């Protein structure tokens, strides 16, 4: 009557694994917007680039909104029906993105793509978790695979857009999703995962408040610079709407018998410190906007060459995954692994600080991008593992959507917006400082244009180096924080000689290991989904 697998019994095990990996390769990089394509979408639609940045955030928000519902949806619908419908929906939404010229339509479809994508992903993670058994090892393999896949998919999205047009990549994604729907209908079984549960316990108003909170916040981060921040009535209204929506959401959760979100886990020490480290990770990941300004604006790279820079992170990401597998198999404490991740991210910023010149050659990108890839991969794996460690299943699922949005949207979005504002401000100051060299005695009318351009380029470099300098100073503070944090280990341990002599400590440790293993098996079903 119930079947906890995905496929019919007649499907061989190697084919099942191949189908799972194939579906993951399709669904994980899927999104409403591909960052490398934004410039082509701006040219094709005539809309502001901020709309597509907003749509990119909307995909993450949709994933976070779906997270508290995934297990209930899993137990409500048969696996074949569920995944077939979701892949068809993803195909239709991708086709809509390919055919529309309205940016707000792309923002809306991106939100639903993120929601549907998470519903599919949870189904594919469960059997892989069972096969690997160890949550840390799975994180190492999974994040290395997904982050590598994301960089490669972004590169090919740009290449297809150059060879054909930006709509073509969405059409290809749509066709592939429809093909995946056909494979689901053929190979997957027609049974329930467990006892069928009703959907009327879901509080849809809470979901609407969750989405509105972060969509208004995303509007502020996306359009803040273009609207001149607090001098804009639209930014002020969006900020107020985000605050009010979150307040209503929090109040509603306190009055519901079955709340959509839970704030209990934020009382735990590892969750609070994990959120802080995710915010610090966002400080380093937010430098991508500065890097793109330098690569495209200063060095004059085209979009395809700029996309190649992200592919240079792949060796570092793979190495981070390999190290994580070794680390978790040996059950080594996380402190030095997290320290190595922040150290490599700091090394990346130091190299970029000293390397930002007009004569920067492409082969000098290899080392900093390798370090950035290792840092990003190791910190995604280790901080996420530490944040969700020792949490009860119900509490974790009820709050994991907030943590996901915090990690992928808020942490990166806040720092990207700050860097954008500071770069503009520092650039104006730098132009004023360099203006002392621009006068009629040193620059003739014939050389005015190239010299003014040179002043502008140097002003951008000065602004970027200032931001990297402040990040470096903050980075040393981050390393000090990581070295002094205990990461869950007891500061003082007492040897209990009586229990040791009586043999009770051995029994207690064995029972503790068995209980820990049982809880991990239940919890790991949902943890990797984010």
Image (cartoon, rainbow, N blue to C red):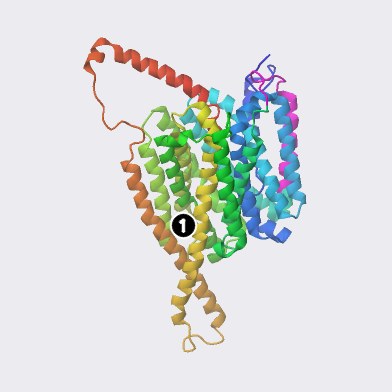
Q: Which residue is mark 1?
A: 364
Kindly tell me whether residue 154 is visible in this rendering: no
Q: Residue furthest top?
A: 502
What residue appears at the point 52 percent right and 23 percent down from the top-left corner?
522
Q: Residue at x 65, y 41 (%)?
A: 208
- Which of the pair 165/64 is nearer the observer? 64
Crowding around mark 1 (Cα neighbors within 10 Å: few <14, some 14 to 19, many 20+) is few
Looking at the magenta stretch, what is its main secondary structure?
Answer: helix
Residue 253 in picture, x, y percent from top left? 56, 36
The quadrant of the rendering that contains the C terminus is top right
Q: Name the residue located 51 percent from the left edge and 39 percent from the top edge.
A: 403
Q: Is residue 194 above or below residue 427?
A: above
Q: Residue furthest front?
A: 255
Whether residue 167 can be seen here: yes
From the viewer's side, name the closer residue of 68 and 323: 68
The quadrant where residue 80 appears: top right
Q: Does residue 123 appear to the left or right of 439 in the view shown?
A: right
The stretch of residues the image draws in magenta is 169-198
- Quarter occupied by the N terminus: top right
**Percent of width and height locating residue 453:** 54, 75
Q: Is residue 490 magenta?
A: no
Element type at marker 1? helix
Q: Answer above or below: position of 60 versus 294.
A: above
The residue depicted at 65 percent of the width and 54 percent of the height is 52
């Amino acid at each position: 009557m119930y079947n906890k697998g995905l496929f019919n019994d007649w499907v061989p095990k190697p084919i099942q694994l191949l189908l799972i990996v194939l579906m993951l390769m399709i669904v994980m990089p899927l999104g409403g917007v591909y960052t490398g394509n934004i410039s082509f979408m701006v040219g094709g639609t005539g809309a502001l680039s901020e709309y597509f940045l907003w749509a990119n955030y909307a995909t993450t928000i949709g994933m976070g909104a779906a997270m508290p519902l995934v297990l209930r949806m899993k137990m409500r619908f048969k696996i074949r029906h569920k995944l077939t419908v979701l892949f068809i929906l993803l195909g239709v939404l991708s086709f809509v993105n390919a055919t529309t010229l309205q940016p707000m339509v792309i923002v809306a479809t991106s939100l639903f793509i993120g929601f549907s994508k998470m519903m599919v992903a949870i189904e594919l993670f469960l059997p892989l978790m069972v096969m690997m058994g160890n949550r840390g090892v799975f994180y190492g393999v999974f994040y290395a695979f997904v982050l590598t896949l994301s960089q490669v998919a972004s590169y090919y999205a740009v290449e297809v857009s150059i060879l054909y047009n930006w709509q073509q990549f969405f059409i290809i994604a749509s066709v592939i999703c429809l093909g995946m729907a056909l494979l689901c209908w053929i190979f997957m079984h027609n049974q329930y995962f467990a006892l069928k549960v009703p959907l009327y316990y879901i509080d849809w108003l809470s979901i609407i408040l969750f989405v509105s909170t972060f969509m208004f916040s995303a509007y502020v981060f996306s359009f803040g610079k273009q609207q001149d921040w607090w001098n804009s009535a639209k930014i002020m209204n969006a900020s107020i709407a985000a605050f009010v929506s979150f307040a209503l959401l929090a109040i509603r959760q306190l009055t519901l018998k079955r709340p959509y979100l839970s704030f209990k886990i934020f009382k735990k020490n590892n969750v609070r410190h994990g959120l802080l480290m995710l915010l610090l990770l966002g400080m380093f990941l937010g430098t991508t906007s500065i890097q793109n300004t330098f690569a495209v604006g200063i060095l004059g790279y085209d979009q395809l060459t700029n996309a190649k820079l992200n592919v240079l992170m792949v060796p570092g990401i793979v190495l981070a995954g390999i190290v994580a597998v070794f680390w978790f198999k040996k059950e080594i404490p996380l402190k030095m692994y997290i320290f190595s991740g922040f150290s490599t991210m700091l090394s990346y910023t130091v190299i970029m600080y000293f390397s930002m010149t007009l004569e920067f050659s492409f082969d000098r990108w290899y080392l900093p991008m390798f370090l950035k890839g290792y840092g990003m991969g190791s910190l995604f794996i280790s901080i996420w593992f530490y944040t969700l460690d020792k949490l009860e299943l119900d509490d974790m699922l009820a709050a994991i959507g907030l943590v996901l949005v915090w990690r992928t949207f808020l942490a990166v979005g806040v720092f990207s917006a700050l860097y954008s504002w500071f770069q503009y401000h520092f650039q104006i100051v730098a132009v004023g400082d360099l203006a002392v060299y621009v006068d009629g005695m040193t620059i003739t009318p014939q050389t005015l244009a190239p010299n003014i351009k040179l002043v502008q380029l140097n002003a951008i470099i000065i602004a970027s180096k200032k931001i990297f300098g402040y990040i470096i100073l903050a980075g040393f503070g981050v390393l000090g924080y990581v070295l002094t944090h205990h990461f869950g280990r007891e500061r003082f341990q007492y040897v209990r000689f009586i229990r040791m002599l009586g043999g009770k400590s051995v029994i207690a440790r064995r029972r503790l290991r068995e209980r820990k293993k049982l809880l991990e098996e239940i919890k790991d079903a949902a943890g990797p989904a984010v």
